[in-house]
Image (spheres, rainbow, N blue to C red):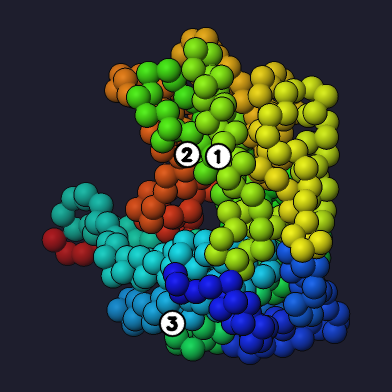
Amino acid sequence: MLDYTYDDWKSRAASLTFRGQAFIDGAFTDAASGKTFASVNPATGEVLTQVAECDAADVNRAVAAGRRAFEDGRWSRMAPGDRKAVLLRLADLIRENLEEMALLDSLDMGKLVTDAATIDAPGSAHFFQWYAEAIDKVYDEVAPTGPGDLALVSRVPLGVVGAVTPWNFPLDMATWKAAAALAAGNSVVLKPAEQSPLSALRLAELAAEAGVPDGVFNVVPGFGAAAGKALGLHMDVDCLAFTGSTAIGKMFMQYSGQSNLKQVWPETGGKSPNLVFADCEDLDAAADMAAFGIFFNQGEVCSANSRLYVERSVKDAFVEKLIARAEATQPGDPLDPASKMGAIVDEKQTEGIMRFVEAGKSSANLVAGGARVTVDGKGCFVQPTIFDDVSHDNPLARDEIFGPVLSVIPFDSEAEAVAMANDSIYGLAASVWTDNLSRACRVADRLHAGTVSVNTVDALSAQTPFGGMKQSGFGRDLSLHSLEKYTALKTTWIKYKA
């Protein structure tokens, strides 16, 4: 695929068929109401297919199927080695269908197909494989007791897990939730974002082919106000994992209190700071990664490094480096390997980004981009945009824009930089650039963020937890720690004759 041309990708896209029905209890099915909604390609405005508009009735069917599967043990009590083999097969199937999975996400939400093919889809396969391998390697505990007592502490699956995922990384976010929840032995009801449901529906089909039993993995596309809310309020959902906006995360917390006190694990908004100190010896590398940290995936990344704090003595030179990189990162057709940025997910998001940009033109110094553009006269595209000399209290520096808009703010001391970086309602991620080891450790320790990347941006792996602090939520995806939110601790105490 790495040698595919623009024509190759367009030809393969034209030959795709799309699954638009919900996937419940091992079969594709229409929404109970018969309603559908359009899945639209944001790069062209063309309708890809009609998708089932699920509501509470469909969520009820999916949760009931998940509960039956959980209670009869077809998955929850399957031998660990057998469950592992199924998820390993699913990882293999994703790899076998890599091209299709990449195209589905690119067409559905506008990301570069080259990114989807080299990062997203391979990442999904990797994470399923990683959690599959963990299944028979995570042990329970025996508590210290006296003679005549045996206390076993085990982690047991919760039951039915609801997962509500965002549109910016459709396949990967579905995987981050489902792989760990399934590995732990739960049933899953997934509600993908209405802007990008297609790869989740194909994933369900591949899961069934891999041997995931009927009812264990269900996908209910639809709108948040209907399908998402129904999951949040459902009395038979034991846990809900959510990635999305802080406002919606708060609603799911309320739904829990209004229903069955289900566990809710939110991973919500971000406004990640990137601190560049004058003692960073490779400012070119820092500029490369600063540009990547905000323009990758069109800036539609919850942990995007959208606040750039640069020590004043190097700020002007650093901004010049950033301008050059922005000018070389213009949007284009997501299917064209030559494109450096793709399309914004939809018209609503594009308009929201441009409202911030237009307001910023009168309150900060626009030095790059700042315009909405089209490709071949169509689509939702925004230029990579940089504002210099942004005041710390400007909405450009406070609010999550979720687009390719960077705010540059100068600082004069380490203490000032840390104070401004921490002065945010968010705490998802942060980056620090310095060649002073003591400063790197000191600043990383003082930043209030779930992940601090030093001399890089947005570092993550299957082995390390991803999640935030403050109003970025407290859910953790990835690593063995992710299994903790999908399991409960159970003590079994046995008296015996010593």
Query: Which disc, if any, is residue 25?
Result: none
Query: Alpha-carbon neighbours of circle 2 within 10 Å: few (<14), some, or many (≥20)?
Result: some
Cα separation, mark 2 vs mark 3, equals 33 Å
Q: Could you say which is closer to the camera, residue 208 or residue 147?
A: 208
Q: Which residue is mark 3?
A: 96
Image quadrant in which you'd find residue 405: top right
- Name the spot of residue 491 as percent of width and height, x first: 37, 58
Q: Amino acid at mark 3?
A: Glu
Mark 1: secondary structure:
helix
Decide: marks 1, 2 in contact (CB < 8 A)?
Answer: yes
Residue 317 placement, left or right of 384: left
Label 3 vs 1, first from the N-terminus: 3
Can residue 473 be seen from the camera position used here?
Answer: no
Circle nearer the viewer, 3 or 1: 1
Extreme residue in the top direction: 412
Query: Which disc, if any, is residue 288?
Result: 2
Q: Which residue is mark 1?
A: 325
Cα separation, mark 3 vs mark 1, equals 35 Å
The answer to whether residue 162 is above or below residue 430 is below
- Name the spot of residue 487 as percent of width and height, x first: 45, 60
Residue at 56%, 84% in the rendered image: 205
Image quadrant in which you'd find residue 107: bottom right
